[in-house]
Amino acid sequence: MTGPSFWHDALPHPVTPRPALPGDRDADIVIVGAGYTGLWTAYYLKKADPGLRVIVLESEYAGFGASGRNGGWCSALFPSSLGKVAKVAGSRDAAIALQRTLNETVDEVGAVAEAEGIDCHYAKGGTIVLARTPVQLERARAEIAEFREYGFGEEDLRLLTAEEAKAELAASDVLGATYTPHCAAIQPALLVRGLADVVERMGVQIYERTPVTSIWNGEARTPHGKVSAETVVRATEGYTKTISGFKRTLAPVYSLMLATEPLSDEQWAEIGLNRRQTFSDGRHLIIYGQRTADGRFAFGGRGAPYHFGSSIKPGYDSHPRVHAELKRVLDELFPTLRDVRVSHTWGGALGVPRDWFASVGFDRAAKLAWAGGYVGDGVGAANLAGRTLADLVRGRRTELTTLPWVGHHSPNWEFEPFRWFGANLGLRVMDGADSEEARTGRPSRRAALFGRFLGS
């Protein structure tokens, strides 16, 4: 079967879904969702206690959702700033601890992939974020200043001059950049599919084509039967709205991507990214990219509309206007690519909490654990979430379980039509803010005001 992204199509073997749940089952822990969060949780649970009976339920197949469609950044990014994390936690030290743990998580993913024989094209080249206008350069300097205020030095994040930035990535109109080593480029579908195979060998039962319709008091109910357990782990990210009672927990927001045909060695010599650095720039409407192991540009960004009622449909994976705009932006950044063919376009829903603050938690009385709300930065954070959930569910108090995202409860999104209006207004504001800044040379006041609505 053809997959929903370039990453799926590049797998060495076509995806064959595992059998559905054959009827009612009992387990110690049932995990809803076979993406990164669910599979990492299963992995660390079985590592800690091989005797645990762990079942994973997946509505399609492992890696069908954002885990198999993303930009392939295994980063140390968190959707909220250090300052906001410190404010929420009431502690500077808590914000520092979370960031340092996320930095270490990038290496943890690489180490586990190597130890378990998962060839996910892991390459820790770091991330470069270009500043291409004076306003973007000022934002880059402000980010550096914040990191210094919290005790992070040049080994964690540093400011590059225009010449240094162009030596890393020769894009147009570069005035400077920030660079962090705490990111690895990966092939996301290889990682999630490989992880599913690993946990299955460890004794985890994975049932695919088994949508969970409700979670209640230790039961995960599906059209094929129910699984009863001491704990249900909700690991559904952008698809959380499909479970009864959780429609306003996370908003499914689409991010779209394209992949070019493989570039020549001469083209890559002109462009850079020779260590497979991931890259972005300082605009408000996010873009992101990487150099794939087979020499393509994988490039994506926001810009697709939020769909009324948190609707998720296969047809939303393609948006010709947004995909055309992505190619235009890529050509603007790298004029040498104007005649390069796009081989794949795709998209997918990611999970956005109302306050843009990812969380991990466990309510033992309700027999419910959860993690998510990564706002597109989940490849690394999901690994940390899996390790943390394994400690929480097993009743262990560790350094991970005291991090400030543990136990955080984001407010629910507004009812429709206010949710639809607010989300799409935000999209227009951020798109217009970039044009405004380019025109005026000053930071966008509209973007700053709307940032408060998003909880930043």
Image: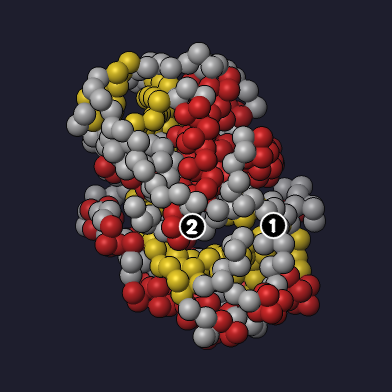
Q: Position of residue 351 (x, y in %)?
A: 40, 49
**What residue is rendered at 25% in x and 25% in y?**
22
Q: Position of residue 427 (x, y in %)?
A: 39, 67
Q: 197 or 237, which is in the foreground?
A: 197
Above-or-below relation of 344 to 307: below
Query: What type is the residue that disc 2 sits on?
Result: Ala
Is residue 140 toward the left or the right of residue 456 in the image? right
Q: Residues within 10 Å of mark 2 (few under 14, many from 20)?
A: some
Of label 1 and label 2, which has the lower sequence position?
2
Tell me if residue 163 can be seen. yes
Q: Residues within 10 Å of mark 1 (few under 14, many from 20)?
A: many
Q: Which mark is residue 452?
A: none
Is residue 208 toward the left or the right of residue 329 in the image? left
Q: Position of residue 123 (x, y in %)?
A: 67, 53
Judging by the rendered image, the residue that carries numbered circle 2 is 10
Furthest-front residue in view?
13
**What residue is rendered at 54% in x and 45% in y?**
191
Judging by the rendered image, the residue that carries numbered circle 1 is 126
Mark 1: which secondary structure? loop
Above-or-below relation of 305 to 170: above
> Which color scheme is applied?
secondary structure
Rendering quarter of residue 306: bottom left
Q: Nearer the viewer, mark 1 or mark 2?
A: 2
Q: Position of residue 432 (x, y in %)?
A: 43, 76
Mark 2: which secondary structure? loop
Q: 365 or 293, which is in the foreground?
A: 293
Query: What type is the residue that disc 1 sits on?
Result: Gly
